[in-house]
Image (tube, rainbow, N blue to C red):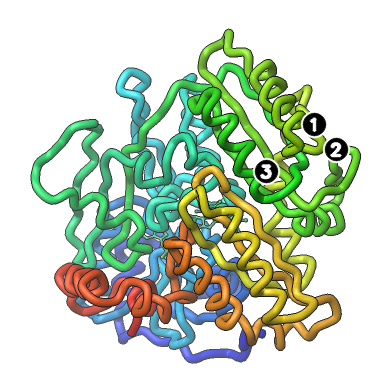
Amino acid sequence: MPDTSPLPVSLPPGLLGALTAVLGPKGVITDPADLAPWTTDWRGLYQGATPCLLRPANTNELSAVVRLLARAGVPMVPQGGNTSMVGGGAPDESGRQVILSLTRMNRIRDLDPIDMTMTAEAGVILKSAQDAAAAAGALFPLSLGAEGSATIGGVLATNAGGNTTVRYGNARELMLGIEAVLPDGQVFSGLRRLRKDNTGYALKHLFVGAEGTLGIITAATLRLFPRARVQCVALAAVASEDAALSLFRRFRDRDDTAVRAFEYMSGTGIDIVLRQIDGASLPVAERADHYCLIDLASSRPDADLQGLLEAVLEAALEAGEVVDAAIAQSEAQAQAIWRLREEHPEAQKREGASVKSDVSVPVSKVPELIRRSSDALRALIPGSRPVPFGHMGDGNIHMNLEQPEGMDPAAFLARGHDIMDTVNEVVRDLEGSFSAEHGIGRLKTDMMDSWRGGAELDAMRRIKAALDPQGLMNPGKVLPG
Ligand code: FAD
Ligand code: 2HG
Ligand code: ZN
């Protein structure tokens, strides 16, 4: 359980006044009640403290406050929507770390339908960015369950993946240019909207996936795509993990440009959603142990996605891979199928304590990952319930474990690192990664040595020391102490 006792908070004398002079009273929050939602993380793993939350309205204001904080040696935590799954956006318990919130910097600066680019400030909510693209007849394809709160700065800082990576790539692949404030307050102006630009080191990529440890992203130029004119969504109950992979291959072989998302869900995960989420219902007749969500989309108005879906599902039914399937016949039905998938995190939270392992393996090894990890987790904690689900099409499975019914949640959470280690052992054997899309944050710094030690971690430390010699940018995150 997080410790909720009051913690000491401090700032050097005179600094608050100087910060307020730059930002105005609207830009400086110090009331503990207003600070509370921003000092803990979405999962409730950490309860931090901060002297203040600063809300700059533009890049110049942010640059000025970073200069002031750097001169005073005050550590800073950049924050967007605070939806990090690894405690990345919350301050620690010292009471010294100032939160730099980007939420007031929420303008779409430019949208060009010929270049197919959009320049958005870091505080733009992901859903608003999608809506702005749609209003211009285009598509910004990044999509994830937290899109109503997560920000452009946050998704880039974590290199978020989400549901459409299989088709469009993760956040990094959608970024053409970036603007950022460096740890000493300088502005890095790299908002170029070019597809080709080989002019030295590709420094813009340093800020993507750095989780706020190398600087603060203030704006980004993002790639847009033609909007989908037809879309078709289905839920298939499948016979096994291998059948799920085989179904994915059938779609990919038939028309890989049509597959917008291909998600795996377990019977246990769906049961939990049906139990915990009001209005959730299963569109197929019988419960199964494995399900796939297939989302096809095309910008071609004449694309026969329904025909494609029916043909592939029929062939898979005949082969015994699919046992039942439902194809959405309306937007409402498509949304209801997606809801079964997107409510997985919330439903697991309501069901009790759960430990997450956001891992990836080569796509061909996903069935083995699910089987071997589930067996190892059940052996580790008898009665516990493995809930594998996620982005099968790109090899990223959330290999989560729900506590045994009736077990003390705190006792279960105390086994968190044993649980993650158990999954990671299988992942290592399958040549995968211990953190596919959520990043390292505060939760996984202790894993960096054994997974990224040697030259890789050494290079990371040297880059960090070069850009942030005082170690003020999101301390305690990503790199082990
Ligand atoms: P925050 O949580 O505020 O911050 C995340 C990290 O980025 C922190 O380290 C923070 O310091 C840093 N940061 C934030 N803004 C900036 C900035 N402007 N400059 C520099 N650093 C910054 N992630 C996925 O990849 N795929 C998913 O499918 C997915 N689904 C989710 C579903 C739910 C219900 C939830 C709660 C989270 C999910 N996430 C997912 C995790 C999360 O990483 C994303 O929601 C998102 O990337 C975080 O954006 P944010 O604005 O909330 O960032
Ligand atoms: C998702 O894919 C998110 O829904 C969250 O990445 C995963 O809750 C999780 O473990
Ligand atoms: Zn995910």
The three-letter amino acid code for the residue at tag 1 is: Ala
Q: Residue at x 57, y 76 (%)?
A: 422
Label 2 vs 1, first from the N-terminus: 2
**Which of 435 and 140 lies nearest the eye of the viewer?**
435
Query: Label 1 CB, ligand 2: below 8 Å?
Result: no
| Residue under numbered circle 3 | 243
Instruction: Please identify the residue farthest to the front as the structure is shown.
Output: 319
Badge nearest the viewer, 2 or 3: 3
Q: Which quarter of the rendered picture does the N terminus lie within?
A: bottom right
Q: CA distance from mark 2 to mark 3?
A: 17 Å
Residue 22 in the image: state x and y as whole percent: 30, 62
Q: Secondary structure at mark 3?
A: helix
Position of 350 relative to 204 (above/below): below
Q: Residue at x 65, y 54 (%)?
A: 389
Q: Residues within 10 Å of mark 3 (few under 14, many from 20)?
A: many
The three-letter amino acid code for the residue at tag 3 is: Ala
Q: Which quarter of the rendered picture does the C terminus lie within?
A: bottom left
Position of 426 relative to 154 (above/below): below
Q: Are marks 2 and 1 in contact (CB under 8 Å)?
A: yes
| Residue under numbered circle 2 | 284
| Residue under numbered circle 1 | 326
Instruction: Please identify the residue farthest to the top as the structure is shown.
Output: 302
